[in-house]
Image (cartoon, helix red, strand yellow):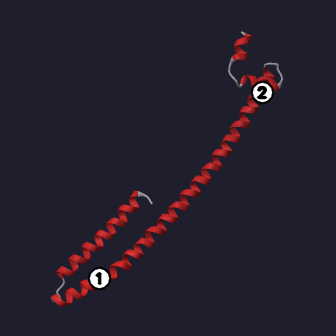
Amino acid sequence: MSNGAGKFFGGLIVGTAIGAAVGVLFAPRSGKETRQVLKRSAQDLPQLAEELGSNVQYQADRFTEQAQRTIDEALVRLQEAIATGQEASRKLQEELALSMGSSPNSASTLSEGDHAIEDEE
């Protein structure tokens, strides 16, 4: 889960707790009624925490799946780019070998460095 989502859910929990406390303190109820409301709120807190935990887990799972798909797609594009680059390099070596009047098999010596060009000079 990203840092922004964690901050959001943390703020949601803190905001809910503060809102409930302020609402209870300023509500026009008697002390007995206020205590009953607080008791019910305290009893609902585990369920709220469980729901919040489930939601966070669901969001984390979605994020993980999305990240895995993105990584897989990037890997496929990278493999395709490497294959394209290797093919282009092979063709260029063949063209260079042909233009220099040598066989395509000797093009592999050119990929080892510029030693072949230095020898001709």
Mark 1 near mark 2, Cβ–Cβ under 8 Å? Answer: no
Q: x%, y% of residue 61? A: 51, 65
Please indicate whether residue 47 sits to the left or right of residue 28 in the image: right
* Residue beneath the point at 38% across and 62% down: 6
Please indicate whether residue 63 sits to the left or right of residue 118 in the image: left
Examine the rendered structure and indicate whether residue 98 appears above or below residue 68: above
* Residue beneath the point at 32% across and 83% down: 43
Which amino acid, mark 1? Answer: Ser
Examine the rendered structure and indicate whether residue 3 appears above or below residue 112: below
* Residue beneath the point at 70% across and 41% down: 83
* Residue beneath the point at 79% across and 21% down: 99
Mark 2 crowd level (few <14, some 14–19, many ≥20, 10 Å Cα): some
Q: What number is the disc on residue 41?
A: 1
Please indicate whether residue 105 sits to the left or right of residue 53 in the image: right
- Dot 1 lies on which element? helix
Disc 2 target residue: 95
